[in-house]
Image (tube, rainbow, N blue to C red):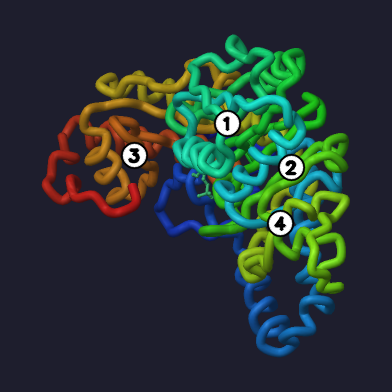
């Protein structure tokens, strides 16, 4: 297809594909779940194990700077999500960081008791709110469809997914934040599906708190540590409940009482998974000097081409994402009653997307390692599967623990 060839020939990001391992012939549309492995991670993990762990052992906490990795890498991530150095720390998991962020938000509005969240939120976010409710009687969780339209003066914290994990719909950061602030509420952004794929611009929009993972578009590796952002203006006033020693102002004084660090380290709890941190360094290196607007432009171009081709060649799939690229993250979803076996048949043919309940085929587009010709080839394979009904084979019905 000439259009795809032309787009690839003028792609300013094409050279980045070489920075990643991808099996020959595989077209990987699951970077919105687990990003591809940066080749440089191998060398860094080697150094981290053979030199820092095997040889230097305990001295590496100082010598290799292990103790400061959460803030050192946090500063680098801050640049990717529109925050300043000192506002982001990398640590723990997204779910755990959300728990901290919820109470941090509540600590800024001690006279209020409502947490407003989306009915369609990624479930762990709501589970963590349930946990907060159990820990502090008197709190209320309000689940709504239209956040901006329902924020009132009883709301302490608004919890919003920047990109909906099912439909890929992009929330209006500016609108929700402005409305929340008008009503005196604090906003927590879940950036799992936007960090590393589009310009997030937290500080431009006057954001309060945000959390997210690094294993999707940021390519940090399976279970790589998550992050938490707190605007500098809030840092002196917030508290979080997981008051472990890594968040203490002087952890090595071994005082009996807890005194939080004055800065972003107050969001740390305990010892961090250093080997995972070290792998993340290779992922952050990829973003050095990268213009997020250029990344976004290619992401929109890839997903728009995918929609155009699927709608032309596979009409039995119904688009479950916004048609307008400006309203999408970097993911396109289609629905079909046989979504699960279709995804399995695609995977067997080297086209890797995923399935989400109840009937969604999800395709994520990472401009770092996908080309427009990958999109063309993938749609041809999808068309073949649908026309031959290859998905109907019994082996495609079996479900693993992880879908
Ligand atoms: C939007 C969103 N929030 C939260 C999470 C949970 O992250 P974790 O398992 O790292 O706690 C995910 C995981 O996929 C997610 O997509």
The CA distance from mark 3 to mark 4 is 38 Å
Residue at (52, 27) in percent of width and height: 141
Give the mark toward the camera: 2 or 1: 1
| Number of marks in the rendered image | 4
The CA distance from mark 2 to mark 4 is 17 Å
Instruction: Tell me whether circle 4 and circle 1 mark residues in contact (CB < 8 Å).
Output: no
The CA distance from mark 1 to mark 3 is 34 Å
Residue at (58, 58) in percent of width and height: 224
Residue with the mark numbered 3: 355
* Residue 265 visible from this viewpoint: yes
Give the mark toward the camera: 3 or 4: 4
Residue with the mark numbered 4: 243
Identity of the residue furthest to the bottom in this view = 55
Residue with the mark numbered 1: 139
The CA distance from mark 2 to mark 1 is 23 Å
Q: Nearer the viewer, residue 75 or 36?
A: 75
Point out the tag, 3 or 4, that comes first from the N-terminus: 4
Residue with the mark numbered 2: 229
The CA distance from mark 2 to mark 3 is 30 Å
Point out the tag, 4 or 1, that comes first from the N-terminus: 1
Identity of the residue furthest to the front in this view = 137
Give the mark toward the camera: 1 or 3: 1
Give the mark toward the camera: 2 or 3: 2
Residue at (68, 68) in percent of width and height: 271
């Amino acid at each position: 297809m000439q259009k795809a060839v032309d787009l690839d020939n003028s792609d300013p990001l094409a050279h980045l594909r070489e920075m990643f391992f991808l099996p020959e012939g595989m077209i990987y549309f699951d970077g919105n779940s687990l990003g591809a492995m940066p080749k440089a991670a191998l060398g860094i993990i080697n150094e981290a194990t053979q030199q820092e762990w095997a040889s230097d052992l305990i001295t590496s906490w100082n010598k290799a700077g292990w103790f400061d990795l959460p803030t050192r890498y946090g500063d680098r991530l801050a640049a990717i999500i529109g925050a300043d150095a000192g506002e982001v720390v990398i640590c723990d998991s997204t779910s755990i960081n959300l728990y901290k962020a919820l109470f941090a938000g509540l600590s800024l509005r001690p006279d209020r008791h409502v947490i407003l969240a989306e009915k369609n939120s990624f479930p762990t976010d709501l589970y963590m709110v349930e946990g907060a409710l159990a820990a502090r009687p008197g709190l209320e969780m309000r689940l709504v469809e239209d956040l901006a339209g329902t924020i009132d003066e009883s709301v302490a914290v608004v919890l919003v997914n920047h990109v909906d994990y099912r439909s890929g719909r992009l929330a209006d950061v500016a609108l929700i934040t402005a409305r929340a602030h008008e009503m005196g509420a604090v906003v927590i952004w879940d950036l799992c599906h936007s960090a590393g794929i589009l310009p997030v611009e937290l500080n431009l929009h006057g954001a309060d708190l945000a959390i997210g993972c690094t294993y999707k578009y940021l390519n940090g590796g399976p279970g790589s540590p998550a992050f938490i952002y707190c605007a500098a203006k809030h840092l002196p006033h917030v508290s979080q409940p997981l008051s472990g020693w890594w968040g203490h102002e002087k952890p090595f004084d071994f005082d009996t009482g807890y005194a939080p660090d004055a800065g972003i380290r107050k969001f740390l709890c305990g010892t961090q998974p250093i080997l995972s941190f070290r792998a993340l360094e290779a992922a952050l290196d990829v973003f050095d000097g990268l213009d997020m607007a250029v990344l976004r432009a290619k992401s929109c171009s890839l997903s728009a081409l995918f929609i155009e081709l699927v709608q032309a060649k596979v009409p039995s799939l119904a688009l479950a994402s916004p048609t307008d690229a400006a309203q999408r993250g970097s993911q396109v979803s289609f629905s079909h009653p046989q979504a699960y076996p279709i995804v399995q048949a695609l995977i067997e043919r080297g086209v890797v997307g995923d399935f989400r309940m109840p009937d969604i085929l999800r395709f994520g587009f990472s401009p770092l390692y996908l080309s427009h010709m990958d999109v063309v080839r993938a749609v041809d394979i999808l068309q073949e599967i649908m026309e031959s009904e290859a998905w109907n084979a019994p082996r495609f019905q079996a479900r693993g623990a992880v879908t």
